Image (spheres, rainbow, N blue to C red):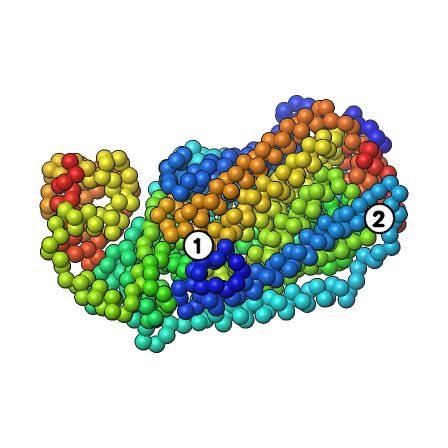
């Protein structure tokens, strides 16, 4: 249960990156010392409480009220221990922060409340970060709006994403599989729904995936493309499909109706209106949703996906 | 002197006006006590509702997401700024400090009253921001979210600004009082350790609080005048806000914990009937914590600042942890070869030793750079913080409340129910927060309204359930406490001047204390912990 295991234990998630086991060793080192110190404290509290409890005939026992050697000892031993922990922790930390030369770069865009990953091959993938196993991956991360934080428990990786600058981190996955990607810096109403997946594939599967990701599969019906895009681009964190009002207006039954705007003229919800709303969301603000602050999806969404969303909205009567 | 002083500060004058314009530190402290207990109840109810929402993985069982975000923000802001910061210094300290020093009042009684009114105004602004829609930024008000959200950030930050002044007023008052108003013969090294802790706290209050005031004003300026300070959209720097915020808020956790440690020193020595072990080391470590506390703010930002800064802050963090460890060892050594009795205040002191030890040791995990990267912003941090703040400060505060209750009201509460409630809090607290350590290290992020659809959802669900059940235990024990405490004010047994046989000065005057604290000038004939030299009979039966 307390061994440094690669599978999930009571305390720690599965180890799926190169740094995980190093971090875990230090975690357990501190953990055992915590147990030892806690045992000392608990022993003193309970044993002394029982042994030196006051009874009517208790006599005063002789005992001194200061002892310099004792004070120095119980300062010095913890000092040595925390210095060990400091240097050990600093060493691993530097390893986690110094990005290996030649790592494969992926650009990460975080925005309320969605992840998007841009690949050097010239395409973007929403929500899911797909990477090859045993390859150092460098993430160049930016935020479109507020603070976010990139966190994958199985990789022991976390880095805040601060708007208006690039934040870098890296990892090397050691196991093929799917891992949760969580936002850990509070970013507003749907913070807890800003979830994604890191999908680690074997080198071959990864290459296959890249090939397919670049090609648009025309055989999938547009409305399905739209439904997938609706979920993958996290439209669902703000726009419902059942008519309920969330951070933005619901998609249900809006097709071919007039959208009432705050300071611009009212517009008919048609193909061009939906396209414009995805790419330039701040152009028209629908009444009652003044504080939605939808970010632009320009460059993050494919044309076919926009067409799909249009079809999808049409289907929601 | 086993009697109830008929002519005391409580009934000296009885009109409402006489309370509202009183300069009596005991009455001001009592008004603080009622105000903070009210906010403690409000913050606690918010926490119970959040725990109830988290009992299932899906969101929306009880609260919608916006309400949840508002609730956790208000829980934090109310508990920190309206309860914990004024709890021990402004309430307990106000009532006890001048009597402990053998003086009639604090140095500036009018400033003392002003601080209460400033606190009330600040809290009223805080309540205003609650009823005008609440705030959803978290108590940390991180930019740029706080500069862009449409909730009542302005009034809440202004409330924090105003509350800061009340804290500064109290700090100034205590420093001058401790320097200038000590009874003749009471020198620095015969001061009770509670006084030392209040002194260190007051220093932090004066030096650190202005920084949060300035930060809050800058945030308000940014929102109203659109000056780019923290919001990158206007050319500002959000990390600057984090630096400013933690430059106050880290020392502020020592404002919260140091006075609690002071209470524990009093309790352990009194109920062990033994001289406190290592008086000078405890006093010195108190000052060391106050000093080092200013230099560790960056450990809140290991995942957002430069690696070099993180290294520096990590190493200073450890140096700050050591004095707290020294205190724990000294308290344990005090128990050795003592004569321990287990009245409710002592049960709280023993609670404190165990819970604060866990809180402190789990801090080592978080101070460690590489391990913190994993644990940062997860439930592990939430649990650590609650072990230090609730397991530490609140438990110490409750210990102090039970210890000085007979001095404040002249009557005893039901000892049996007080013990039951103290033990229940211990179990309820651990049941609530130990599961949070585990799910935090497994990767459950904090400030999550729902946790459905994750790999570990089932595991988190189990621990969240335990945690929620634990929170009901805590609530139940507080209800019991409320009943027996209120009951005791009128119906409790008369306590007499010194129910615990303690040696500090506040026990040499009748209970409740007379309006001017002492009927005759107090005599300093022994040190505060000289239980090895003299013995004073208790004025109640054991």
Residue found at the very far bottom of the displayed protein: A101
Q: Is residue B367 above or below residue B122?
A: below
For the image, the number of numbered tags is 2
Residue A38: name its quadrant.
Answer: bottom right
Which one is in front, B394 or B54? B54
Return the x and y of residue A98 as percentages of the image width and height: 41, 72
Q: Is residue A29 visible?
A: yes
Q: Is residue A94 above or below residue B33?
A: below
Which one is in front, B515 or B322? B322
Which residue carries the number 1 mark? B443
Quarter placement of the C terminus of chain A: top left
Q: Which mark is residue A26?
A: none
Return the x and y of residue B4 as percentages of the image width and height: 79, 27
Secondary-structure class at tag 1: loop
Which residue carries the number 2 mark? B531
Which one is in front, B346 or B217? B346
Side of B480 relative to A231 (left or right): right
**Circles 1, 2 touching at the beta carbon (< 8 Å):** no
Question: Chain ID for label 2?
Answer: B
Side of B420 relative to A192 (left or right): right
Secondary-structure class at tag 2: loop
Residue A256: name its quadrant.
Answer: top left
Q: Name the residue: 56% across, 57% down.
A: B363
Return the x and y of residue B70 as percentages of the image width and height: 42, 40
């Amino acid at each position: 249960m307390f061994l440094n295991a690669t599978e999930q234990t009571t305390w720690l998630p599965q180890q799926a990156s190169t740094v995980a086991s190093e971090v875990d060793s230090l975690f357990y080192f501190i953990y055992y010392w915590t147990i030892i110190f806690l045992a000392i404290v608990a022993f003193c509290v309970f044993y002394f409480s029982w042994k030196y409890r006051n009874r009517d005939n208790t006599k005063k026992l002789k005992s001194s009220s200061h002892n310099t050697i004792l004070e120095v000892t119980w300062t010095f031993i913890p000092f040595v221990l925390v210095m060990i922990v400091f240097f050990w922790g600093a060493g691993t930390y530097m390893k986690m922060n110094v990005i290996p030369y030649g790592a494969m770069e992926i650009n990460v865009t975080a925005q309320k409340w969605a992840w998007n990953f841009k690949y050097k091959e010239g395409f973007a993938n929403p929500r899911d970060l797909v990477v090859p196993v045993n390859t150092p991956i460098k993430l160049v991360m930016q935020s479109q709006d507020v603070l976010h934080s990139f966190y994958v428990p199985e990789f022991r990786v976390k880095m805040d994403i601060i708007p208006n600058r690039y934040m870098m981190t890296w990892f090397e996955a050691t196991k093929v599989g799917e891992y949760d990607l969580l936002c850990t810096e509070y970013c507003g109403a749907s913070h807890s729904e800003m979830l994604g997946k890191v999908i680690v594939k074997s080198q071959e599967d990864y290459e296959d995936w890249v090939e397919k990701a670049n090609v648009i599969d025309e055989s999938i019906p547009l409305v399905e493309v739209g439904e997938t895009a609706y979920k993958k681009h996290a439209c669902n964190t703000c726009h419902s499909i059942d008519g309920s009002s969330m951070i933005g207006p619901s998609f249900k039954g809006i097709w071919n109706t007039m959208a009432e705007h705050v300071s611009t003229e009212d517009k008919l919800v048609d193909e061009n209106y939906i396209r414009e709303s995805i790419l330039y969301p701040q152009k028209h603000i629908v009444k009652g949703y003044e504080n939605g602050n939808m970010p632009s999806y320009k460059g993050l969404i494919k044309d076919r996906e926009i067409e799909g969303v249009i079809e999808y909205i049409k289907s929601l009567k | 002197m086993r009697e109830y002083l008929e002519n005391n500060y409580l009934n000296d004058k009885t009109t409402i006006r006489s309370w509202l314009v009183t300069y009596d530190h005991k009455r001001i402290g009592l008004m603080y006590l009622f105000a903070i207990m009210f906010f403690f109840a409000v913050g606690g109810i918010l926490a119970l509702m959040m725990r109830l929402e988290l009992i299932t993985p899906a969101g929306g069982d009880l609260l919608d997401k916006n309400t949840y975000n508002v609730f956790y923000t208000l829980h934090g802001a109310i508990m920190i700024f309206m309860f914990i910061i004024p709890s021990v210094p402004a309430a307990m300290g106000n009532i006890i400090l001048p009597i402990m020093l053998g003086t009639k009042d604090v140095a500036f009684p009018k400033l003392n009253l002003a601080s209460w009114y400033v606190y009330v105004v600040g809290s009223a602004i805080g309540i205003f921001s609650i009823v005008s829609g609440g705030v959803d930024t978290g108590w940390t008000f991180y930019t740029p979210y706080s500069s862009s959200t449409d909730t009542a950030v302005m009034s809440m930050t202004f409330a924090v600004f105003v509350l800061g002044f009340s804290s500064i007023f109290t700090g100034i008052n205590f420093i001058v009082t401790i320097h200038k108003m000590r009874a003749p013969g009471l020198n620095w090294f015969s001061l009770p350790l509670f006084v030392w802790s209040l002194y260190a706290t007051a220093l932090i209050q004066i030096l650190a609080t202005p920084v949060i005031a300035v930060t809050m004003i800058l945030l308000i300026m940014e929102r109203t005048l659109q000056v780019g300070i923290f919001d990158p959209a206007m050319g500002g720097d959000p990390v600057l806000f984090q630096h400013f915020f933690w430059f106050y808020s880290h020392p502020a956790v020592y404002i919260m914990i140091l006075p609690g440690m002071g209470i524990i020193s009093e309790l352990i020595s009194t109920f062990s009937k033994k001289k406190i072990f290592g008086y000078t080391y405890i006093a010195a470590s108190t000052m060391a914590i106050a000093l080092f506390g200013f230099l560790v703010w960056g450990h809140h930002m290991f995942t957002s600042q430069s690696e070099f800064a993180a290294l520096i802050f990590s190493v200073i963090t450890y140096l700050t942890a050591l004095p707290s460890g020294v205190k724990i060892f000294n308290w344990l050594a005090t128990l050795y070869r003592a004569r321990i009795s287990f009245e409710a205040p002592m049960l709280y002191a023993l609670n404190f030793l165990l819970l604060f030890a866990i809180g402190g040791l789990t801090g080592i995990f978080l101070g460690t750079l590489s391990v913190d990267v994993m644990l940062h912003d997860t439930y592990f941090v939430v649990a650590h913080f609650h072990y230090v703040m609730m397991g530490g400060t609140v438990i110490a505060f409750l210990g102090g409340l039970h210890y000085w209750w007979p001095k404040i009201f002249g009557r005893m509460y039901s000892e049996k129910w007080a013990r039951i409630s103290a033990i229940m809090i211990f179990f309820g607290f651990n049941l609530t927060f130990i599961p949070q350590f585990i799910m935090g290290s497994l990767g459950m992020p904090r400030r999550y309204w729902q946790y459905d659809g994750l790999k570990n959802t089932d595991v988190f669900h189990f621990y969240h359930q335990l945690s929620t059940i634990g929170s009901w235990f805590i609530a139940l024990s507080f209800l019991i406490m409320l009943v027996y405490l209120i009951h005791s004010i009128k119906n409790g047994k008369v306590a007499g001047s010194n129910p615990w046989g303690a040696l500090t000065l506040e026990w040499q005057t009748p209970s409740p204390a007379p309006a001017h604290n002492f009927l005759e000038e107090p005599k300093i004939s022994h040190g505060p912990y000289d239980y090895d030299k003299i013995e004073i009979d208790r004025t109640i039966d054991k």
